[in-house]
Amino acid sequence: MLHTLQACIFDMDGIIVDTAEAHYQSWKKIAYSWGFEFSRAANQPLKGASRMHSLELLLEMLGVEKTNAEKEVICALKNDYYLASISELTKADVLPGVLNLLQELRSQSIKTALGSASRNAKRILQILELDHLFDAQVDGNDVHEGKPNPEVFQLAAARLHIAPERCLVIEDAAKGITAAKRAGMHTVGVGNPEELKGADLVLSTLEDMPWKSICTLLDKEGTETQAEREKLH
Ligand code: B16
Ligand code: MG
């Protein structure tokens, strides 16, 4: 694996920075204004989904109907809440291990890309002072279909001129893992293994996780999966 991977594509919310919580709190505020509670568990399917898709999932869950014009207004309001809640974001908020990993990838000539559903992602990378460490940046403004559609990752690989099977995607959301798998890429999930079952490897954090260790663990998982497959035959 170490010798075959040529690019690493990073999801943003929940991987580079913990803005996933800010998205949740913003939708919670919207739901509350309609008289509903909105739990973290109920928020899971919204992770990685585009802004409008997230609203549609929320409306369906709560059994609420809105016109298209109302949906546009609600999405704008949710984004206002979201931007207000991240207004004090600085480079100190980059999640542990991310900066080291990006710098290490640079030094080893492994290409790096952003693959985020968020339409705020490029702006946030600038605030975090990380944008110079990415060879390509693809976000929600660049695609027609959100995750789990593979478009965001396919476009990132195309911009890097790297074949999908040479790319590794690092994601915190089930929808993102599905999108990366559909693109034919290798996957590392960061978070709860129960939620990220489809990933080739699940880590609890990127802290103290250099590229070499990630590749070694991916190789190990691959070998074990192969052995399990052979056992079944
Ligand atoms: P925005 P990611 C995704 O970002 C979030 O996971 C998801 O919760 C959010 O709805 C989506 O971005 C859209 O974000 O409202 O900022 O355009 O995880 O793909 O980096
Ligand atoms: Mg994410």
Image (cartoon, rainbow, N blue to C red):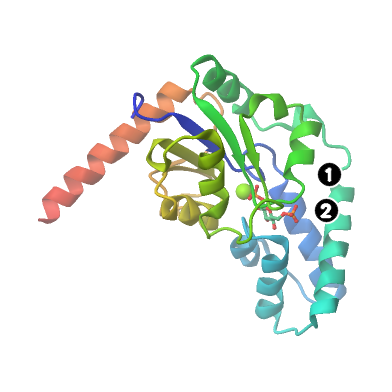
Q: Amino acid at mark 2?
A: Tyr
Q: Nearer the viewer, residue 136 or 24?
A: 136
In this rendering, would 154 be left or right of 138? left
Whether residues under marks 2 and 1 lie with C-beta atoms below 8 angstroms apart, the answer is yes
From the viewer's perspective, is residue 83 above or below residue 163?
below
Q: Amino acid at mark 1?
A: Ile
Q: Residue furthest left?
A: 233
Q: Quadrant of residue 23?
A: bottom right
Q: Nearer the viewer, residue 28 or 89?
A: 89
Q: Can residue 35 be seen at all in this image of the molecule?
A: no
Q: Bin the neighbour count of mark 1 within 10 Å (Cα to Cα): few under 14, some 14-19, many 20 and up.
A: some
**Could you tell me which residue is drawn at 80 percent across and 83 percent down?**
67
* Picture coordinates of residue 103, whole percent (x, y): 59, 19
Q: How many marks?
A: 2
User: On the image, numbered disc 1 is attached to which residue?
Assistant: 86
Is the CB atom of the residue marked by disc 2 within 8 angstroms of ligand 1's nearest atom? yes
User: On the image, numbered disc 2 is attached to which residue?
Assistant: 82
